[in-house]
């Protein structure tokens, strides 16, 4: 069964802390996405990865294809980073651009 | 500004009534998607459309219907056959069905009373 698991489900941090959110998947993928969902519900795409590492500002995403694992890191966290972070994958055996989503990680950053 | 709009943001309906959720995009994307989000669960695919006048069932299509008469529009109807329609509904689009990067609308929260 094609599955995506995220950990932790909930994460509370103090402003300035380094944060890591993890995503594991069951079988081979062609792409992995990290998404951010704000309290209002809208979702924005942060990264799309198929290998290696990407960085944008304070956000870093890495993927290890052999271990079927990806991490999203936030450096110098800020209360405005509080959101739900969602991992989504496109499995190799899936047609087209269909994505399978993790349950999300609720991040709260306190001032 | 290019993007995806969904209306309304909040929608209330009585049990047994059909309701149609709007999704419009001006990104000139061929593919469009409807997802349902419930607390503690990942997004689940209801229907998708690879191109105008075409659509396929996703993982949880029962009780829903769609149409794709125009490239920019992909409305979703929640019918009375949907057993548990109260949820947050998200529309998304991608340049083409072979491209996995999707752009999401702001969502519609449907509450059936």
Image (tube, rainbow, N blue to C red):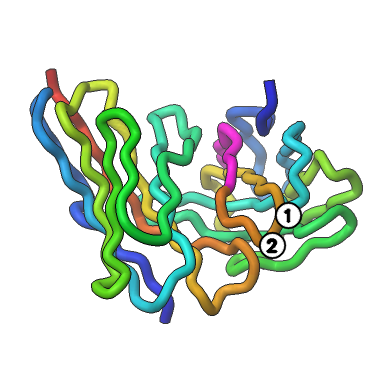
Residue under label 1, please give it: B79
Marked residue chain, label 2: B
| Quarter of the image that includes the C terminus of chain A | top left
Q: Can residue A100 be seen in this view?
A: no
Circle 2 SS class: loop
- At 34% from the left and 34% from the top, the residue drawn is A56
- At 69% from the left and 62% from the top, the residue drawn is B63
Was residue B105 drawn as part of the magenta stretch in this picture?
A: yes
Task: Point out residue A88 in the picture as x, y percentages from the top left corner.
Answer: 43, 57
Judge by depth and name the residue closer to the eye, A65 or B50: A65
Question: Within 10 Å of the Cα at label 2, are there few (<14), some (14-19), or many (20+) other Cα atoms?
Answer: some
Q: Can residue A71 be seen in this view?
A: yes
Q: How many labels does the image show?
A: 2
- Point out the tag, 1 or 2, that comes first from the N-terminus: 2
Furthest toward the bottom, the residue is A1
Residue under label 2, please give it: B63
Span shown in magenta? B102-113
Marked residue chain, label 1: B
- At 60% from the left and 28% from the top, the residue drawn is B9
Left or right position of A52 against B43: left
Judge by depth and name the residue closer to the eye, A94 or B86: A94
């Amino acid at each position: 069964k094609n599955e995506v698991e995220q950990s932790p489900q909930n994460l509370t941090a103090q402003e300035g802390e380094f944060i890591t959110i993890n995503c594991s998947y069951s079988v081979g993928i062609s792409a992995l996405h990290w998404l951010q969902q704000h309290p209002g519900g809208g979702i924005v795409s942060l990264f799309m990865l198929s290998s290696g590492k990407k960085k944008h500002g304070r956000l870093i995403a890495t993927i290890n294809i052999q271990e079927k694992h990806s991490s999203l890191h936030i450096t110098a966290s800020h209360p405005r980073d509080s959101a739900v972070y969602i991992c989504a994958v496109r499995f190799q055996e899936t047609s087209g651009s269909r994505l399978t989503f993790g349950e999300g990680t609720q991040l709260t950053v306190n001032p | 500004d290019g993007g995806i709009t969904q209306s309304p943001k909040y929608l209330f309906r009585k049990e047994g009534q059909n309701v149609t959720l709007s999704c419009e995009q001006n990104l000139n994307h061929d593919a469009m998607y409807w997802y349902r989000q419930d607390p503690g669960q990942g997004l689940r695919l209801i229907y998708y459309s690879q191109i105008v006048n075409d659509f396929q069932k996703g993982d949880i299509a029962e009780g829903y219907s769609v149409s794709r008469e125009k490239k920019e529009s992909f409305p979703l109807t929640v019918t009375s056959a949907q057993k548990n329609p109260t949820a947050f509904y998200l529309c998304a689009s991608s340049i083409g069905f072979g491209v996995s990067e999707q752009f999401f609308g702001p969502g519609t929260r449907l509450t059936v009373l």
